[in-house]
Image: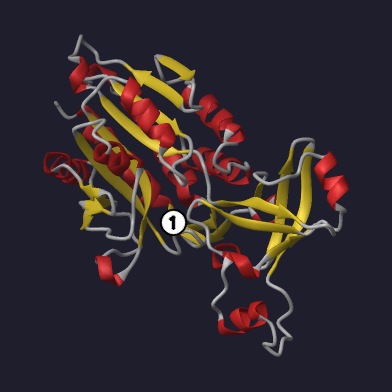
Amino acid sequence: MERNEWIDLLQKLLMARGPGGQEEDVRELCGKALKGCCDELHVDAAGNLVGLIKAATPALASDALKIMAHLDEIAMVVKLVDPDGTLQVAALGGAKPVSFGACPVDILGDDGVMPGVLSFGSMHSSGATAQGRDVLAGNVSWDDVHVVTRQSRETLMAKGVRPGTRVVLSQHWRQMFRVNDGLAAHFMDDRAPLVALILAAQGVARRREALARDVWFVCTTLEEESNAGAMYAASRLPGDTVLAVEVGPVLEEYGTVLSANPIVNTGDQKGYYTRAVVNGLIEAAKRAGTEAQVALLVEFASDASAVMSAGICPKAGCVAIPTENTHGYELVLETGIEACAATLVEFALARP
């Protein structure tokens, strides 16, 4: 896939709404992109999209590699519908009010998508209320915000809006923005890694004569909430090694910078990654013509660390695209996505 083609795919993925539990629009786009390069492709019972590229010659099931990138995005979920139709919301995944700001939202009712505005209240406040004090102090929590719908509770309920309904950033604000060689948008997490996974699958398929193990490409559900999709898939697919493809924070405390060089994560909140897998990723990055940024991402987690910490797979690793403003208005480099994909190809083709 040429650069202009995958950038077009990335824009489509960014525009697709994909809160945890309702990732079908994102999954459909990924399925179309993976269809031509996978030997097998299916959606499992957990909603994961699962593709397989088989080894050139028969290989041990335990040698199989599972590469995962997640379909879902950070979002909101309705907690309460007030009598006037105002929605009280809570975080879905690692979202914070500052992640979105006061902004247009799409309310995903049973009978269709409805518009709303995420509101922090007026800035012209004396601080007489708790909400006003929090907003003025910049200490905004989900208790301080609400969604204005301009519809009655009865109308909303009739349209299938109730506690548990997903609320996402509106497509009105999902357009990608170019910053020289950078690409910026909400939800590069995890749309950019999905593109890297798709590019890697295409790259492995082109070189399948050198492939010594089966490689599963898994687009997972519910990563931001519970890693449930990854744990379901990993427990049912063969292979002792799972690899997560992620966005990686660009921060001085981690020694990471915004560049093409992929971040190889050595550990996070859920444990330390397998040393042999970490070393394999570092060497794979070299063979791909880049240099890994090796980092210990303390305030972080991935599908792979969740799978390993649950005892489902004995070996795990994580490679990430350097990303400015993670869980915000995220910025990645074109070359960062391509370098991540190339590293995945080299790791997959290495003898297990």
Give residue 194's quadrant in the image: top left
Residue type, numbered disc 1: Val
**In the picture provided, is 11 more to the left or to the right than 299?**
right
Residue 13 at x, y = what percent?
Answer: 57, 41
Q: Is residue 139 visible?
A: yes
Residue 111 at x, y = what percent?
Answer: 79, 35
Give residue 117's quadrant in the image: bottom right
Residue 58 to residue 225: above or below = above
Q: Is residue 202 visible?
A: no
Q: Which residue is mark 1?
A: 332
Give residue 349's quadrant in the image: top left
The single residue placed furthest to the top in the displayed view is 58
Residue drawn at (32%, 25%) of the image: 235
Residue 116 at x, y = what percent?
Answer: 76, 56
Q: Helix or strand or loop: what does disc 1 sit on?
A: strand
Pick the quarter of the image with the C terminus: top left
Residue 242 to residue 106: above or below = above
Residue drawn at (27%, 58%) of the image: 297
Front residue (pair 239, 3): 239
Front residue (pair 278, 284): 278
Front residue (pair 305, 186): 305
Residue 324 at x, y = what percent?
Answer: 42, 63
> Badge 1, how many Cα within 10 Å: few under 14, some, many 20+?
many
**In the picture provided, is 187 more to the left or to the right than 219?**
right
**In the picture provided, is 191 more to the left or to the right than 218?**
right
Residue drawn at (68%, 71%) of the image: 120
**In the picture provided, is 103 more to the left or to the right than 137?**
right
How many labels, in total? Answer: 1
